[in-house]
Image (cartoon, helix red, strand yellow):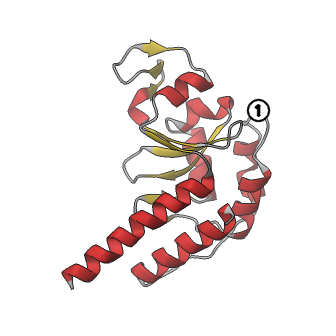
Amino acid sequence: MSSSVKLRQLAETAFAIAGESVPLGFDPAQIASTISRLPSGISAELRALFTENWPSDFFLGSIEIIGPNRITTEHEELYPGLAIIPHGFICIGSDGAGTMYSHCQSDGRVYLLPNENFSDDGLHSNSWDKLEMTPDNIKSVAISSWDSLEALFDWAIDELEKLRQEQQNDA
């Protein structure tokens, strides 16, 4: 299945559990200032997801998918977005506590990057050693990673199914 199908499945599952929904998709022109800061822009896959199926600002179990306003804010005002965007990473979601799901445009992987490793001083390893800000060093501080957007959405669907089971068991 494609990442688009998986994202729609993730959104529909989350909407069913929550009993509410949000509109899907937005015009990527809304984040033009963010896209312009990426060395090679955004991938065709991510552009299509934003346009067709992106459930903006909706908490989908283990991941909050962020919308255009929040995407812009993350890259203009907050870490890790400020630090990673010139290195080809774009924040697409949050764990709700500042750790960001960040899509790498060069390798197509998604990295879960903790905000506390990034600051005005730069990048710090998990043992707090100062690191040069490079794509490889950014990847090295990731808490977790997924091979693709589709793999991230598969994982999030599994997490939602666990939540649904817990809710049914509690009922």
- Quarter placement of the C terminus: bottom left
* Residue 70 visible in the displayed image: yes
Q: Position of residue 159 (x, y in %)?
A: 40, 63
Q: Is residue 80 left or right of residue 8?
A: left
For image coordinates 52% across by 79% down, the residue present is 21
The quarter of the displayed image where residue 56 is located: bottom right
Q: In the displayed image of the protein, which residue is found farthest to the front?
A: 1
For image coordinates 22% across by 80% down, the residue present is 169
For image coordinates 41% across by 21% down, the residue present is 125
Q: Residues within 10 Å of mark 1 (few under 14, many from 20)?
A: some
For image coordinates 52% across by 64% down, the residue present is 57
Q: Amino acid at mark 1?
A: Pro
How many numbered marks does the figure carry?
Answer: 1
Q: Of helix, strand and loop, which one carries label 1?
A: loop
Q: Position of residue 44 (x, y in %)?
A: 79, 52
Q: Is residue 118 above or below residue 151?
A: above
Q: Position of residue 163 (x, y in %)?
A: 33, 70
Q: Is residue 166 above or below residue 92?
A: below
Location of mark 1 (residue)? 39
Q: Is residue 37 left or right of residue 149?
A: right
